[in-house]
Structure formats: C-alpha cells, structure tokens
C-alpha cells in the first residue's frame, strides 16, 4: 500500500507562490515517508466551482480531484491571503465537503502573503476552519511572505527549516504506517 499526500492551493495565480510552497511540502513529505504526492489548485476545479451548490455540480474531473483530496492519507492545504483571510473560492470548496469527511485526517496548514502582517491567518482563519472538520491539524503551520521566495520558489533558510519541522509532524500518521508497511 502506498501512502498518498495531497496538496490543495486556494490560488488562481499561475505561477503561484502558494502552489509552489504546497508542492514543495508535498514532495518533502512524500520523500520523508515513502508516499506519493499530488497538488491541485482552484484552476483545476473550474469552471463550475463558483456555481456549485454541491460536489455533484462539479465536472467529473473536478469531482475526481476532490475525491483524491478526501481519500489522501495526509493533506497540505493553503491559500494566499486576501484582505486578511483565505480566498473565497477556497472556502467555497470546503463548504461543499461533508463535515465528517476530514475527521482525524492530518493536515498541514500553509499560507502566503505579501508581508509578515498576514502571518496569523493560519491561527485565526485556517485552523478554525479545519477544526470544524475535526481534522488533525499539525502543530506547526507554515506562513511565507514574498521575501521568502526567489524567482517564485521557496528559498529562505528559515522558511525551509520551518517547512521541514512541519512535515516531520506527519510522523504519527505516516511514519508508523510506513514502518508497519516495511515490516
């Protein structure tokens, strides 16, 4: 059995710093725990996401993406910060998901913004959202400002160190399972 890590970025931008950070986190988690990794963003769910009243209103490809997110062994989710919070369509996607679907699932929370003043978005916006779903949010969230990127890629040593610390916190879920699989 291969363990699966799925990332989701609440961004429409391309390229996207949020997606780059989530991609890096997903690939580091996959490498660390012998898992596979995949990352999606809002553009992958268009054009119907904004008009959807249920997951059934999404196109088959978009529904398959949501199914991949829900069935993953671990999630890495994040959003760029807009006006002090996550993006509206990011929230809309999670409004469509059954409240029990993410219970107990380990989730690494990530956010990006133009400056450090938005760093608390993880604690004040994302953590309560995933608390509602009874997800097992990792203790360390990862916020990155524009200064943490070079050519659109995560680059600062402080950010990369924090990211590795957060990824290591998947150990209780992915590490034990990987060890049991190896035995």
Image (cartoon, rainbow, N blue to C red):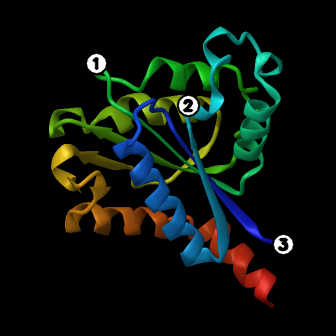
In the displayed structure, does residue 124 sit left or right of residue 76?
left
* Residue 25 versus residue 33 in the image, above or below: above
Q: Secondary structure at mark 3?
A: loop
Whether the residues at callouts 1 and 2 have beta carbons within 8 Å, the answer is no
Q: Position of residue 172 (x, y in %)?
A: 61, 68
Residue in the picture at 41% in, 26% down: 86
Disc 2: which residue = 43
Foreground: 126 or 76?
Answer: 76
Q: For the image shown, how many numbered marks are present on the structure?
A: 3
Q: Position of residue 62 (x, y in %)?
A: 73, 31
Residue in the picture at 53% in, 29% down: 129
Residue in the picture at 34% in, 45% down: 17
In the displayed structure, does residue 107 sit left or right of residue 100?
left
Q: Residues within 10 Å of mark 3 (few under 14, many from 20)?
A: few
Q: Which mark is residue 45?
A: none
Disc 3: which residue = 1
Q: Real-space Cα distance between discs 2 and 3? A: 30 Å
Q: Position of residue 50 (x, y in %)?
A: 60, 13
Disc 1: which residue = 83
């Amino acid at each position: 059995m291969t363990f699966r890590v799925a990332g989701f970025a609440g961004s429409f931008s391309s390229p996207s710093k949020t997606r780059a950070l989530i991609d890096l986190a997903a690939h580091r988690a996959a490498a660390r725990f012998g898992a596979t990794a995949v990352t999606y963003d809002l553009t992958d769910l268009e054009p119907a996401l904004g008009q959807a009243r249920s997951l059934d209103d999404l196109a088959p490809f978009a529904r398959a993406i949501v199914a991949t997110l829900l069935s993953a062994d671990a999630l890495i989710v994040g959003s760029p910060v807009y006006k002090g919070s996550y993006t509206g369509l990011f929230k809309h996607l999670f409004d469509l998901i059954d409240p029990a679907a993410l219970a107990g699932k380990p989730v690494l929370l990530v956010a990006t913004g133009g400056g450090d003043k938005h760093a608390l978005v993880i604690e004040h916006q994302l953590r309560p959202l995933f608390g509602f779903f009874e997800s097992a949010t990792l203790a360390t969230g990862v916020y990155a400002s524009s200064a943490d990127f070079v050519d659109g890629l995560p680059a600062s040593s402080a950010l990369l160190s924090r990211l590795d610390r957060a990824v290591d916190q998947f150990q209780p879920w992915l590490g034990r399972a990987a060890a049991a699989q190896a035995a």
